[in-house]
Amino acid sequence: MTTPSDDGLSVIMSERRQLINLAYRLLGSLAEAEDVVQETYARWYAMSRSQQESIASPGAWLTKVAGRICLDLLGSARARRERYVGEWVPEPLPGRTGSIDDPADRVTLDESVNMAFLVVLESMTPAERVAFVLHDVFRYSFAEVADIVGRTPAACRQLASSARHRVREARASVTPAAEQAAVVRRFKQAWEAKDIAALVGLLDPEARAITDSGGQVNAALRPFEGGERIARYAVEISDRVPGMTIEECSVNGRPGLVARRDGVTVTVVAFEVADGRVTRLWGIRNPDKLRLWG
């Protein structure tokens, strides 16, 4: 028999997926997003039953608390990332595993989680990012955003407008997934063949590559540019890691590659493709960010 408390618990727990989706987009880290959601629920259950029942919209309350926790974390994240060894890239999400226990399966894979979009979000101030994601991605009103960010609705509107301008400036022409998959497949084949000329042909002359190792494994600590330089670096990696296998996969909802050695994932590569060529690559090698990849 279902009791009122059971119904209340069901309503509260049904918000979990929404909160994970919000926190991941705000933080770029699924591990941190899970921590935020756990802390949000801890604050809910720290209240008395009468306090909980006095809240007209538990979902709105949970979103408000999670948003404020994320805002605080974004402020401290800037300082942490200044101490980070090498470049920081958002944690990559694999495609669907079919496991309901996999937290990655609770994140909706759409254009607001592709790697290029998340990297643009990283360039925003914490308030810009929260206002933009809440309003433009999750469709909260500016009055609701203001309650979370602690600014006036007009100020939040300006924050979102500024963030929107950053997105427009950085956004390349959207390449259909099938076309990007074809380019990524050819890149994989050329990489496996160690064919530098073919790789150069697939890379934009001004392509940019970033690798994230967190200082835990060997990787370039600074971005590097130029199709030929990136092609030679890719082949150098293959020479340095004998027995490495490369597979096509979904990375944050877009075609990408995963490199494994002895069954262990060593690198996940996300791509941005425009006009049939790779314009940007993000190679995530930090083992802490590959926990969902086997």
Image (cartoon, helix red, strand yellow):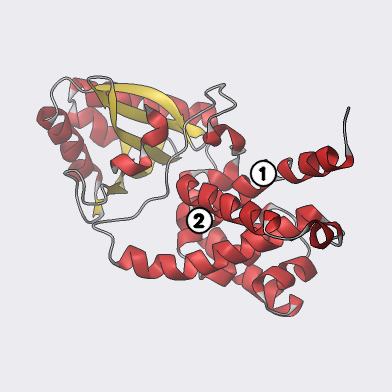
- Rounded to the nearest angstrom, the CA distance separating label 2 from label 1 is 16 Å
Q: Position of residue 67 (x, y in %)?
A: 63, 62
Q: Position of residue 176 (x, y in %)?
A: 55, 33
Q: Is residue 224 visible?
A: yes
Judged from the image, the secondary structure of the residue bearing numbered disc 2 is: helix
Residue occupying image coordinates x 75% and y 55%? 139
Q: Quadrant of residue 256 in the image?
A: top left
Q: Quadrant of residue 154 in the image?
A: bottom right
Residue occupying image coordinates x 53% and y 30%? 102
- Count of all numbered marks drawn on residues in the image: 2
Q: Residues within 10 Å of mark 2 (few under 14, many from 20)?
A: many
Q: Nearer the viewer, mark 2 or mark 1?
A: 1
Q: Position of residue 19 (x, y in %)?
A: 65, 49
Q: Position of residue 179 (x, y in %)?
A: 49, 29
Q: Classify residue 191 as left or right of residue 236.
A: right
Q: Amino acid at mark 1?
A: Arg
Residue hosting label 2 = 27
Q: Classify residue 245 as left or right of residue 272.
A: left
Q: Quadrant of the C terminus?
A: top left
Q: Are marks 2 and 1 in contact (CB under 8 Å)?
A: no
Q: Amino acid at mark 2?
A: Leu
Compared with residue 92, is residue 222 higher up or lower down, i.e. above or below?
Answer: below
Judged from the image, the secondary structure of the residue bearing numbered disc 1 is: helix
- 272 or 141, nearer to the observer: 141
